[in-house]
Image: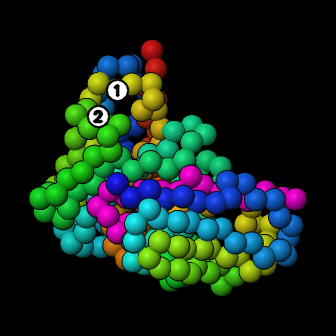
Amino acid sequence: DIQMTQSPSTLSASVGDRVTITCRASQSISWWLAWYQQKPGKAPKLLIYKASSLQSGVPSRFSGSGSGTEFSLTISSLQPDDFATYYCQQYNSYLWTFGQGTKVEIK
Amino acid sequence: DVQLVESGGGLVQPGRSLRLSCAASGFSFDDHAMHWVRQGPGRGLEWVSGISWNSGTIGYADSVKGRFTISRDNAKNSLYLQMNSLRAEDTAFYYCAKDGDGPSWGQGTLVTVSS
């Protein structure tokens, strides 16, 4: 199975900060990588698919990059609505796997 | 728009069974593989099972293999998860998800396994 290692597990930041979350795959997944945002009690919301494609309706301050085994999600200017938990997911393999999650907290 | 609506969750005793359903609309259901993903209380996301468009390829997480069975009915645009021999650790929100360039998810249904 493909393992996804996401870091950091927790990130403390202020409104307006630029933040980056990284995700590493245990083997190449090409660009089959998605990023989700999840708030308490809600289903995960797709932000980025195919490593760098912005899902319709998602603000442009969110961006994704990478291919192969190294990926990142960047929020260019953190907004109050962005404090949440973020997950990466590989879907190159039929057996989907997820990163452990990154909780973005208010500093 | 893609819509996935899960149902069938509830409170069940350990060792009993439950069947989840997912009604799909807004896309060509029989063109896509489908998956179940779960999230236990305070935990991360865990892939449970997946099925190809024609049911020819099926996979399970080790944690549910031999107890859960995924199936689909393309004529009814529906996905199912038969869960047998349920354990307390199966307590979670269960999400139905559509494969594709950008995965789509339902809102989930809660399964609570407790005596």
| Residue at x-position 42% and y-position 32% | B90
In the image, B78: left or right of B36? left
How many marks the image carries: the answer is: 2
Which residue does the numbered mark 1 point to in the structure image?
B86
Q: Nearer the viewer, residue B107 or B51?
A: B51
Q: Work out which quarter of the rendered image holds the C terminus of chain B and state it.
A: top left
Image height check: is B99 above or below B96?
below
| Residue at x-position 39% and y-position 19% | B13
Going by the numbered disc 1, the residue's amino acid type is Leu
Q: Nearer the viewer, residue A21 or B33?
A: A21
Going by the numbered disc 2, the residue's amino acid type is Met
Q: Position of residue A54 (x, y in %)?
A: 54, 82
Q: Helix, strand, or loop for circle 2?
A: strand
In the image, B88: left or right of A14? left
Asked whether residue B41 is drawn in magenta, I would say no
Q: Position of residue B101 (x, y in %)?
A: 37, 77
In the image, A79: left or right of B71? right
Q: Position of residue B99 (x, y in %)?
A: 33, 67
**Which chain hosts label 1?**
B
Image height check: is A9 above or below A50?
above
Q: Are marks 2 and 1 on the same chain?
A: yes
Magenta residues, start to end: A91-107
Image height check: is A97 above or below B92?
below
Q: Are marks 2 and 1 in contact (CB under 8 Å)?
A: yes
Q: Helix, strand, or loop for circle 1?
A: loop
Asked whether residue A104 is drawn in magenta, I would say yes
Label at residue B83: 2
